[in-house]
């Protein structure tokens, strides 16, 4: 659950001036605008204090800049739910207060709004914090967290680091094939991946067998002792996966909101690509280490697809995740909508300058329309003639 009070932030501030005053000239506003320059030296509690300062200001003015600053602080603090809520706030400004929210008015500042939001795609703003985000961590008092890169390594048997590995790494650094910064992470990442996998194989006989065959099993491994921790970590990855999907969906919605308003949108491709990779790794982790209880509940007669559904990820409260494109021929209007959404996401992720999504979004609105509504949408000037031909009473 997010700590951001969206309803409170989105409430009209004044009858005559629902967006409140422009505070961009105030010293406090300028301090917040400059705050991201210090984020690299702040710890999560300090970053969340910045978020609260920003939301306090947003109770006085509807301005996207404090939300942009707060978004950067929240993602660095690892609070994905707050990050999603803050981007939702900006989207709601575009949907509900487009003409007047700050910087405004829209007729003068629409491009400026896009430029401000596009700054989120800079590496230091969201990309690097997402790359360093812990997908899952060991329980307190440990502070160990496993990034997406480590989780991906843990999908396969991970051997113990050896002196030969170090010599090969040193040679690659000397040749320029690997940077010194990347080299410093090589052994810690491999050790972390080995630790994570050494826990998770407690709930997968198949993966434990692969480690044994590769001679990668940790000595004195005790599956029964480790299994509760493995299940706890799996649940944490599941929760993180739900959050990452929600953030990705919200960014897509934010881009679409701007495209509807002005046929242009902030450049979020790098962030969406990073989230796509993190979601893919997390999904692979859930499949590689399925919940044993879920698998045991499946009757022997059920097919493999049913087993995958039961062992897959569901949203909190037992609700199923949003339907995803299967690649099969659509068999209903609902399937058509899912397919169109998948195509739009492809272009947003891989060809953000393509006009295809704009066309498809209009087509998407037609899917549920009947003949008369479709004609009314496509050719409003023909409505009277259609009414006459079909003897439709003009209401």
Image (cartoon, helix red, strand yellow):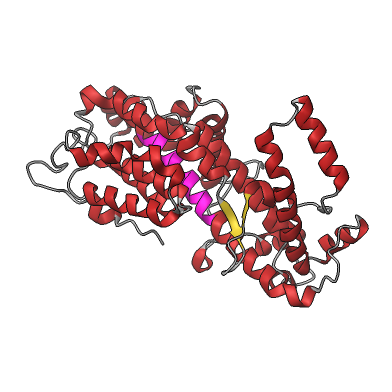
Q: How many marks?
A: 0
Residue under the point 37% across and 51% down: 85
Asked if the stretch drawn in magenta spans residue 245, the answer is: yes
Residue under the point 46% across and 47% down: 76
Q: Main secondary structure of the magenta part?
A: helix
Residue under the point 47% across and 22% down: 355
Asked if the stretch drawn in magenta spans residue 133, the answer is: no
Q: Give the farthest residue toward the bottom.
A: 224
- Against 33, residue 111 (above or below) is above
- Against 221, residue 68 (above or below) is above
Name the residue nearer the viewer: 48 or 42. 42
x, y percent for residue 174? 78, 28
- Against 348, residue 45 (above or below) is below
x, y percent for residue 29? 23, 39
Residue 204 position by quadrant: bottom right
x, y percent for residue 260? 35, 31
Name the residue nearer the viewer: 125 or 162. 162
Q: Is residue 388 visible?
A: yes
Q: Is residue 333 left or right of residue 222?
A: left
Q: Which residues are magenta?
A: 242-257
């Amino acid at each position: 659950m997010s700590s951001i009070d969206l309803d409170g932030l989105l409430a009209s501030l004044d009858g005559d001036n629902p967006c409140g005053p422009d505070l961009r000239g105030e010293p406090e506003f300028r301090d917040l605008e400059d705050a991201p320059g210090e984020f690299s030296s702040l710890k999560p509690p300090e970053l969340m204090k910045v978020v609260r300062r920003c939301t306090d200001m947003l109770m006085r003015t509807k301005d996207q800049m404090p939300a942009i600053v707060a978004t950067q602080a929240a993602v660095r603090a690892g609070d994905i739910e707050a990050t999603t809520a803050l981007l939702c706030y900006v989207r709601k400004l575009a949907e509900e207060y487009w003409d007047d929210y700050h910087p405004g008015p829209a007729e003068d500042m629409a491009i400026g709004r896009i430029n401000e939001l596009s700054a989120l795609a800079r590496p230091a703003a969201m990309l690097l914090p997402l790359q360093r985000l812990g997908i899952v961590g060991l329980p307190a008092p440990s502070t160990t967290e496993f990034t997406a890169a480590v989780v991906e390594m843990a999908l396969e048997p991970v051997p113990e680091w050896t002196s030969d590995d170090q010599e090969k790494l040193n040679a690659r650094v000397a040749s320029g094939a690997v940077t010194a910064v990347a080299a410093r992470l090589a052994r810690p990442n491999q050790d972390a991946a080995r630790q994570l996998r050494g826990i998770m194989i407690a709930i997968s006989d198949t993966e434990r067998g692969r480690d044994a065959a590769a001679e990668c099993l940790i000595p004195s491994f005790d599956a029964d002792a480790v299994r509760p921790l493995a299940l706890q970590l799996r649940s944490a990855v599941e929760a993180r996966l739900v959050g990452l999907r929600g953030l990705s969906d919200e960014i897509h919605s934010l881009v679409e909101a701007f495209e509807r308003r002005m046929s242009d949108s902030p450049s979020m491709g790098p962030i969406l690509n990073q989230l796509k990779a993190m979601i893919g790794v997390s999904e692979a982790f859930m499949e590689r280490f399925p919940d044993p209880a879920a698998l045991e509940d499946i009757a022997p007669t059920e097919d493999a697809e049913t087993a995958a559904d039961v062992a897959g990820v569901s949203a909190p409260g037992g609700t199923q995740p949003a339907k995803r494109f299967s690649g099969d021929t659509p068999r209903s209007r609902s399937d058509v909508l899912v397919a169109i959404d998948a195509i739009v996401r492809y272009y947003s992720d891989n060809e953000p300058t393509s006009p295809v999504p704009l066309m498809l979004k209009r087509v998407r609105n037609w899917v549920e329309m009947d003949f008369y509504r479709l004609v009314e949408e496509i050719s409003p000037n023909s409505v009277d003639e259609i009414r006459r031909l079909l003897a439709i009473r003009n209401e």
